[in-house]
Amino acid sequence: SAVISQKPSRDICQRGTSLTIQCQVDSQVTMMFWYRQQPGQSLTLIATANQGSEATYESGFVIDKFPISRPNLTFSTLTVSNMSPEDSSIYLCSVEGGQGIAETQYFGPGTRLLVL
Amino acid sequence: AQKVTQAQTEISVVEKEDVTLDCVYETRDTTYYLFWYKQPPSGELVFLIRRNSFDEQNEISGRYSWNFQKSTSSFNFTITASQVVDSAVYFCALSEAGGYSTLTFGKGTMLLVSP
């Protein structure tokens, strides 16, 4: 499987600010996804990061709040904009489609975000 | 619409006990994949298994085993002789087969294994 890293691993932010989370894979992958996991909850898909085009957002998530970039096949960023305490969550990226990782999503270690 | 139900919110066992985590799913797709992931306290999500809908053979991997029954739409996960390191939240998930489909997760079952 691919080796996936996320930066930062955790952060504490003030409300009204923005944080950009990076996801890096050690090999080229077709698909990259961003999930949110609120405290004690399951995972919710935010969007699919598309290489060379705009991300595809799930219902309830908008580009102005969660802008996503995917400049190449190994890297993506998720920005959480104008944060509020309700944005306190674990944010995880996942990847699928690449050498040895077909038809299964593998997840990064996650970014723990606390908004005060 | 797809749905995954993990009715057990939390299970507590003592080390060396066997434990089964239940997963029931709903889908209109004729072909699909079922998954189990483990999330230890550190937070990362670890892939455990993927099962194709057309393959109902049970699978065993060390102390882990999975029982897939299409007739009851269930994909249960058993840990034999549980250990403290098995303490984690376990998620069952479902996706449509073919192409790149999104995962539908259950709410997760927290397993606490005490010494």
Image (cartoon, rainbow, N blue to C red):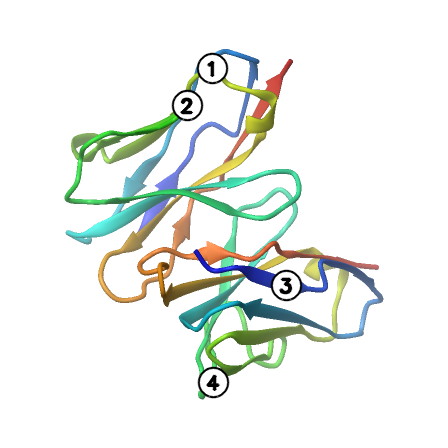
Instruction: Write down the residue under mark 1.
Output: B81
The reply to whether residue A59 is in sight is no
Instruction: Write down the residue under mark 3.
Output: A6
Quadrant of the image containing the N terminus of chain B: bottom left
Query: Please, what secondary structure does the residue beneath circle 1 have?
Result: loop
Q: Is residue A70 left or right of residue A96?
A: right
Q: Residues within 10 Å of mark 3 (few under 14, many from 20)?
A: many
Where is residue B19? Give x, y as percent: 44, 18
Instruction: Write down the residue under mark 4.
Output: A54
Q: Are marks 3 and 4 in contact (CB under 8 Å)?
A: no
Q: Of A42 and B54, which appears nearest the observer?
A: B54
Quadrant of the image containing the C terminus of chain B: top right
Could you confirm whether marks 2 and 3 are on the same chain? no
**Picture quadrant where residue B95 is located:** bottom left
What's the distance in space between the residues labelled 1 and 3, CA to CA? 34 Å
In the rendered structure, find residue B56 and report the number of the disc placed on it.
none
Could you confirm whether marks 4 and 2 are on the same chain? no
Q: Are marks 2 and 1 in contact (CB under 8 Å)?
A: yes
Q: Chain of mark 2?
A: B
Asked if residue A102 is positioned above or below residue B54 in the image, the reply reads: below
Q: Nearer the viewer, mark 3 or mark 4?
A: 3
What's the distance in space between the residues labelled 1 and 4, CA to CA? 48 Å
Could you confirm whether marks 1 and 3 are on the same chain? no
Residue occupying the point 74% across, 69% down: A83
Where is residue A4? Give x, y as percent: 55, 61
Residue occupying the point 39% across, 63% down: A96
Where is residue A62? Give x, y as percent: 55, 76
Q: Amino acid at mark 1?
A: Ala
Q: Chain of mark 3?
A: A
Q: Chain of mark 4?
A: A
Q: Which label's residue is closer to the chain start, 3 or 4?
A: 3
